Amino acid sequence: MPEIMLTGWALVLLIVGGLTKGSTSFKVSGILSVIGTACALYFAVNLWGTNLDIFNQLYTIDDYGTFFKVLFLAILMLVSIISMRYADREGIGSGEYYSLLMFGVLGMMVMTSSHHFITIFIGLEVMSLSIYVLCGLLRNNMASVEASLKYFLLGAFATAFLLYGMAMVYGSTGLMDVVELKKYFLAKQPFSATMFVIGMGFLVVGFGFKIASVPFHMWTPDVYQGAPTSITAYMATGVKAAAFGALIRVFFTAFIPFHFGWSEIIWVLAVLTMCVGNITALAQRDVKRMLAYSSIAHAGYILVAFITGDRALASSMLYYLMAYSFMNIGAFTVVIILAKTGDTGSDIDSYAGLGVRHPFVALCMSVFLLSLAGVPPLAGFMGKFYVFSTAVKAEFYWLAIIGFLNSVVAAYYYLRVMMYMYFRETIGEPGAVDKAPQYGIVMVICIGALLYMGIFPKAFVLIAQKAVGIFS
Amino acid sequence: MTVMSVPILSFLIYFPLLGAVILLFANRRNSQFIKIFTLVISLIELAASIPLFFKFDDAAKTMQFVEKADWFPEWGISYLLGIDGISLLLVLLTTFLTVICVLCSWKAIEDRVKEYYITFLFLETAMIGTLCALDLVLFYIFWELMLIPMYLLIGVWGGPRRVYAAIKFFLFTMAGSVLMLVAILTLYFFYYNSTGVYTFNVLELYKASIPIVKQYWLFGAFALSFAIKVPMFPVHTWLPDAHTEAPTAGSVILAGVLLKMGTYGFIRFAIPLFPAAAIDAVPLMSILAVIGIIYGAIVSMMQPDLKRLIAFSSVSHLGYVMLGIFAFNMQGVQGGIYQMLNHGISTGGLFLIVGMIYERRHTRMISDFGGIAKVMPIFAVFFMIITLSSIALPGTNGFVGEFLILLGAFKSNVVYGTLATTGVILGAVYMLWMFQRVMFGVITKEENRNLKDLGGREILILVSMVFFIILMGVYPKMFFKKMDTTVAEYLAFVKTKSAQVRVLEQDAAGARVAKEIANKNMTR
């Protein structure tokens, strides 16, 4: 099982980190981490098609969970490859780094592979604890420490909300298993208890924090900017996907009988998330921060499909998360390449003239930005197309229109970066660009994935559809 | 449908892309090679497109050269290409103008030559793809793809305010197309609900009978998107900026092909998909078209900048095209399509002319010229012919198009026809006045005294433009016979389809009334 593999490997890495010293240790850990991830990925892929409940229904292996496992491991793989160079440069040279990354992914896997509240909560905590530490790894950088503290404090609040929510649902029904809850609600319709409604609301708040939906998004820009960039990429993709994974599982199973109730609330959240994320991103001059706000907006797009409550079409969210992970990791990789040591230099001015200085990097960045903006034939377009077609199918026309108009606003700030890269002359003395093969590998993988998913979406959509098959 | 053994349309679409990919590996310092290579690619492309014209079966009522492959059958997305009499002519216009554009950029572009030609070839792929696609998703993908190279062409190689113009261009057109995307999806699910089949195939979707209220909404979304591209009157503001800032070849291709995508979209998608709504929209569209004609002409008159003048004259000319299309009779529609080609050649020619004197003088202000006819006699002749074609002198291509449009407009509504005719007069006024100020009179500026006349490459470019101006003016039958059947089919289809919808509506309304009466009787 990939979980055991990953845990074992993380522990091995801790020991290796302790035994060896200095930057050699870091290189060894990096390579070991990539190998470990590859093994885990192999096991995860082999799980496809297996469906069973283990540990007294506390843990589940199903296609939905496996889909997310593969996605998390792919993210872990890419982030590890980036880190081999990046973390060294930033002086985060300790073996724990990779162990923490792995533990984080372990948490994510646990979160999405269970239909029991307790297990989901444990997974969430394992993931969050790793990330609190990872955020603050740039110990000499005030922003990083602040990010860590901020994420920790607010994250603790969110966790509390989530736990309260779970407790209240338990209090009003006596059940903690999502599947059992669904049966209970279907049997007892109409079911309405104030405590239950509040509990459901608290769950929305708790998950809303993790997926960075407005108005629970306040932490995002600061934390994303302060954290080491590799960790930002990791958070923006992995954490978000995990939170969505658990959210979809809980709401599309247990609370689907109350769909009419929560879809109204989430409608407002989705519109706010898209609009606030995009409009605030317009005003950013720092590319890393701009990407943070844009990731808020992307959570909004995914929520659009969530609202419809159409379980068969939940696959659109999975597809979107997949596409989104590749384009975001790619974009953050470019941020890393251009940043100087200490994570400065992500200001938009340092992108000026990049098209002349480093045509390849500029071309890669353009692909990622165009995909984020949803321009065909890249995966970002197919993702948006799929998500919004879900909304249109459910006759949420206004939501779809608002969503598409938002992507026009978004196109503006993505294009602005392209504009700086191609239309502007280099400003001032450009810093040296960190050219390492690792980044190249990651960028090429991401671009390949985006093009492939965009032009031949069929295989991916079918996989996503099979994954959500558990809901029907 | 005929299926050709050679996938000629796919070849036409991807051949320039292949060229662009090869260019990626070219040495950037060897700009001579890059230019020649691009020219060869675009010439092969042109040569490959010519057989289309001769092999095209004039009498066939269906799409020709059809290529079909499953792409994503579960969603009903297919790779479906095909052309009829309308797209045929536009494809030829595209391949022809691309060669012209490559030639006219020869000396004008010295900065980032390699990227420039790559962008251009990429643009050609997107344009031809848009014209051939018969699957809505495929169409949308090419439609959006056209934006990126044009954005770069304006933004990288444009004039001083290029960044503003590029972004304005991108956002305007993208805002329009996202609404269209919602409409496409709505139509798609509507068709599924009424037939149980998922398809984006336009030819299938034509068959859907959509209730009139839904048609209004969907037509509105499509129409807005295409109207921005055309550009029609209130949403035209991006055009003068984009035109003025774009490099010469960018302006030529923008006027020649990209604007036609809007009018083409009306004919191919917005009108036949939602015929009843389109016919109901005739007054609105015609009024906007007439406003565009007159407004464009008046504003042109006031422009001190040559390129801006031509840009606003495009608003006026495209107004004619829209008026013709929405006349819904044979003359109007054929005239509209013919005018699309004419505008591509005449206005494209004018932009070339302006580009040529701009290369010599680095100014486009009318006041900086005067009396040039004496120093540049060859140039003056070409300029004169193209100007006359733009004001629709009999014997030139412009006359045939405008005449037919006005004929059609009069036939459908005398008021629109009369108003549009004033545009012809205004057009002659601003164009001739412009010509007089630039070319005649005494030379006031010393710099103009030593201007060099046209070189061989420039003459070649203009001769080929003038050739078509005369050919299309004198022997229009050659082109009309290609689109006769298509247009007749199209009009018959739109009319019967819209009548059917109305009958259905009436039946439904009648059934409602009958039901109400029955209900009343029951309660009594």
Image: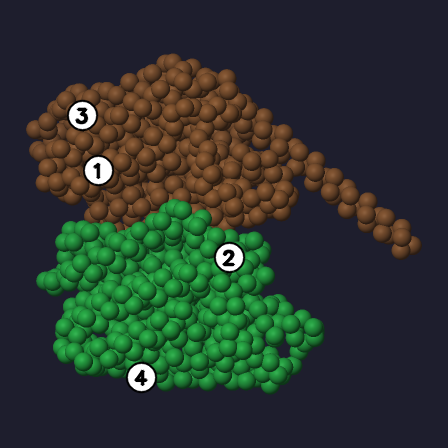
Quadrant, the N terminus of chain A: bottom left
The amino acid type of the residue labelled 2 equals Lys
x then y, percent, for residue B401: 42, 23
Discs 3 and 1 share one subunit: yes
Q: Colour of chain A?
A: green
Name the residue tied to disc 3: B458
Name the residue tied to disc 4: A149
Discs 2 and 1 share one subunit: no
The amino acid type of the residue labelled 4 equals Leu
The amino acid type of the residue labelled 3 equals Glu
The amino acid type of the residue labelled 1 equals Ile
Mark 2 vs mark 4, CA separation in Å: 40 Å
Name the residue tied to disc 2: A466
Mark 2 vs mark 1, CA separation in Å: 40 Å
Image: B91 above or below A170: above
Mark 4 vs mark 1, CA separation in Å: 52 Å
Residue drawn at x 12%, y 33% as measured from the top left: B32
- Find out whether the residues at labels 3 and 1 contact each other: C-beta distance under 8 Å: no
Q: Label 3's element?
A: helix
Mark 3 vs mark 4: in front: 4
The foreground one among B505 and A114 is A114
Image: A143 above or below B158: below
Mark 4 vs mark 1: in front: 1
- Find out whether the residues at labels 2 and 1 contact each other: C-beta distance under 8 Å: no
x then y, percent, for residue B62: 51, 25
Mark 2 vs mark 1: in front: 2
Name the residue tied to disc 1: B22
Q: Earlier in the sequence, mark 3 or mark 1?
A: 1
Q: Earlier in the sequence, mark 2 or mark 4?
A: 4
